[in-house]
Amino acid sequence: MKRFVLLFFALLGYSLHATGQEQRIAGFIYATDPTEAIPFASLWLYDPATGEPEYGTLTSANGYYEFDAIATNRTYRLEISGPGIQPQTRQIEIAYVPGIEGRRYFHFPVIRSQKDLATVHPVEVFLPEQIAPDARTIEDFYSHIPGITYEDGYLTDENGATVCLMFSGIIPDEAGYAAILTNLTADNIERIEYYRLDNLEEPYYDGVLNFVTVGVNFNAPSIKEQLTPSPGCEL
């Protein structure tokens, strides 16, 4: 299922159509025994009336996902799939809660399919000095990555399929991306990793381009820290 999604303005959850009161929801996709984050897992919320996918998103390297604005007071069919896990389907009710202006958290445990597939490895690793030795900004790299096309705010692969952009395994929102462009230069990029996801079941993105940074701390908490129950978390 291919989705052409603007790089940054829809990274935290894309809606084909949303009406009524909305709620931002977020959480972690993780496996247990031991507790481990599931990176690059795709989440789809299906419209209960039409059975069509209405929202979709992808987890960061630390297993975190976020939907920016979900129409509430509905029960969706949630489908989760990803590398090294068994696809699962469940019902999830998104109720409107007055007074909650931030995120509601829903954490979902999943079952591993094959232990050796739980860790995702890049299919290509690019060194900045090799692909764009004259680069000065982050965006200078986009048009120099082999097999990747950058045009009008989109990254696509050689087949025209969507590619998600991450920085040290984190998907930035619009404000975060603006801060990255302001505060990081080409010198902050150690390497660029390319992951293929198009062999997975219904991926939200077909690939991931991860800029591994140096001299920058994104303060991404560990999965175990985040799974400590707190008020408002549905575990």
Image (cartoon, rainbow, N blue to C red):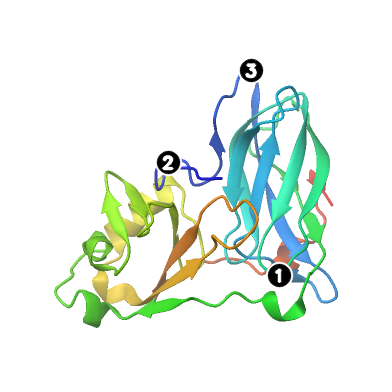
Instruction: Work out whether residue 221 or residue 126 is closer to the camera in this orientation and state it.
Output: 126
Q: Which residue bears the numbered disc 2? A: 9
Q: Earlier in the sequence, mark 3 or mark 1?
A: 3
Local crowd size for mark 2, using a 10 Å CA cut-off: few (<14), some (14–19), many (≥20): some
State whether residue 216 appears in this view.
Answer: no
Q: CA distance from mark 3 to mark 2?
A: 21 Å
Q: Earlier in the sequence, mark 1 or mark 2?
A: 2
> From what the image shows, is residue 73 above or below residue 168?
above
> From what the image shows, is residue 77 above or below residue 192?
above
Q: Earlier in the sequence, mark 3 or mark 2?
A: 2
Local crowd size for mark 1, using a 10 Å CA cut-off: few (<14), some (14–19), many (≥20): many
- State the SS at label 3: loop
Place residue 133 in its image quadrant. Answer: bottom left
- State the SS at label 2: loop
Q: Is residue 166 left or right of residue 144?
A: right
Residue 86, image x and y in percent? 78, 62
Q: CA distance from mark 3 to mark 1?
A: 36 Å
Q: Which residue bears the numbered disc 1? A: 84
Place residue 1 in its image quadrant. Answer: top right
The label shown at residue 20 is 3
Inspect the image, locate mark 3, and give the three-letter code of the amino acid beneath it: Gly
Q: CA distance from mark 1 to mark 2?
A: 29 Å
Q: Residue at x 58, y 66 (%)?
A: 61
Q: Residue at x 43, y 52 (%)?
A: 161
Residue 181, image x and y in percent? 30, 57
Q: Residue at x 77, y 53 (%)?
A: 107
